[in-house]
Image (cartoon, helix red, strand yellow):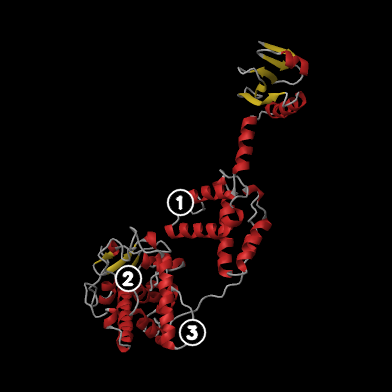
Amino acid sequence: MTKMQALTPSAIERLARGNLKDRFCPGLSVEVISSGKKVWKYARRVAGAGPLVRLSFGQFPAYSIAAAREWAGKLNEQVEAGIDPRETLRREELRASMTVARAHGLYMRAVREGRASRAKRPNKPRTIADKLTIYEKDIAPALARTIIYDVTERDLIKLVEKKGRTAKVRANRLAAEVKVFFGWAASLRGLEVGLEPDPSSRLGDLRFPETPRSRKLVRQEIEWFLLSLVDEEHDYRRGMLLWLLTAARLSEVSEARSDELVEGLWIIPPSRTKNSVEHCIALGPWGWSLMQSGSEWVFPAPKLNGPRSRNCWYVARNRVKARMEQLAGRPIERFTPHDFRRTCRSNTKRLKVDFETAEAVLNHVKKGLERTYDTYELEEEKRDWFLRWEQEISEIATAAGAGELLGFSISGPGPVSPGSARKPQ
């Protein structure tokens, strides 16, 4: 039974069944449920023939008449304005649960699906891994549990400045990724988060000065490097020699697959190159023999089905550097896998290689109109360079007495004369 009268505590106490509507507050009623308890209810249609809104508040007398009327009054303001208060509640609940961690999970899903940037293409595994590393090491410890709408510009500045005190280059990478993440959350691409305003909008102004790396190995260091590889574990020895012989990036070498080796060529697919352009490296006999593993992966992990992790290569690099310092009798400046690319490129002019070929050896693409109209791929010129560079390194190894120990004299099916290795048509 439904009754409508002025609600008073005594009237509600006398209500034994049914409900009692409030004469002064549209939509508000108190209802006796099956357990005999009295519960505040709200039922009213949204203005403009909208849906019927039904909501519950709590029990009487825990919630007084005044509290129930205040609650229902706020609902009436929305209903009479044509707003469904349930949608408002859902948004508030979402807002209360949208931590930085949850928003980042949505962002990474968009990254994998190609919805995180204007480019609208899925990111490469390496890019995804880098984004996750930055989040897990630098963003999550400070902000993971914070509601993303509560993050301020000052919070982000403190995050980047803290990193900048110990690692300026990494701080710049952190700032760039934070700007991309929060920018996505505040853009139409990130409507599922709906952040506004974007606290990272000015973060691009916070940049630490970077000194471009110029490290390259000189001939004497290359000799020490080769000698130090002799005592290294077989797979690491093969891999680090390939850093030097091919000028390929660490990830390109360490994650190489055996099916990328075709008729004397190592063909790195677009999905594994930094610029998404296929890169063909003509391998000499030594380089070809170093790529052989008898496995799906050129450098298979010993216990897992996959390649060796990138971190283990840096550990091996440290062992080799320590041996180099013993040979040199002094400390040697730190070098990275990428420095072998610079070493290779720095020797091109000495070995009479033209600029375009030198850039193609590193898989650097042409720029501007030249990229549009000059589509010649320089494969023959690249092949000649890789063979010449392998011969140069083998001569250094031989002079140091490490040639045979490093296996360069092993003949294999790689190209041995001009024209013998060609990209499959």
Residue with the mark numbered 2: 235
Label 1 vs 3, first from the N-terminus: 1
Q: Mark on residue 112? A: 1
| Callout 1: SS | helix
Task: Report the amino acid beneath label 1.
Answer: Arg
Q: Residue at x 62, y 38 (%)?
A: 93
Residue 179 shows in this picture:
no
Could you tell me how far apart the alpha carbons at marks 1 and 3 are, in whole angstroms?
A: 43 Å
Of the image marks 3 and 2, the number of the one nearer the N terminus: 2
Return the residue found at the far front: 35
- Amino acid of disc 3: Pro
3 and 2 marks in contact (CB < 8 Å): no
Counting from the top left corner in percent of width and height, residue 157 is at 65, 61
- Residue 56 falls in which quadrant of the image? top right
Quadrant in which the N terminus appears: top right
Q: Give the percent coordinates (x, y) of residue 18.
A: 65, 13
- Classify 293 as above or below 225: above
Residue type, label 2 = Asp
Across and down, in percent, residue 210 comes to 58, 72
Look at the numbered disc 2 and give the secondary structure of its residue: helix
Q: Percent x, y for residue 367?
A: 45, 68
Q: Residues within 10 Å of mark 2 (few under 14, many from 20)?
A: some
Which label was assigned to residue 128? Answer: none
Q: Nearer the viewer, residue 369 or 35?
A: 35
**Mark 3 Cα-neighbour bin, 10 Å: few <14, some 14–19, many ≥20:** few
C-alpha distance separating marks 3 and 2: 26 Å
Residue that mark 3 sits on: 331
Identify the secondary structure beneath mark 3.
loop
Name the residue located 64 percent from the left edge and 64 percent from the top edge.
Answer: 205
User: Visible in this render: residue 241?
Assistant: yes
Is the C terminus in the top left, top right, bottom left or bottom right quadrant? bottom left
Residue under the point 47% across and 83% down: 332
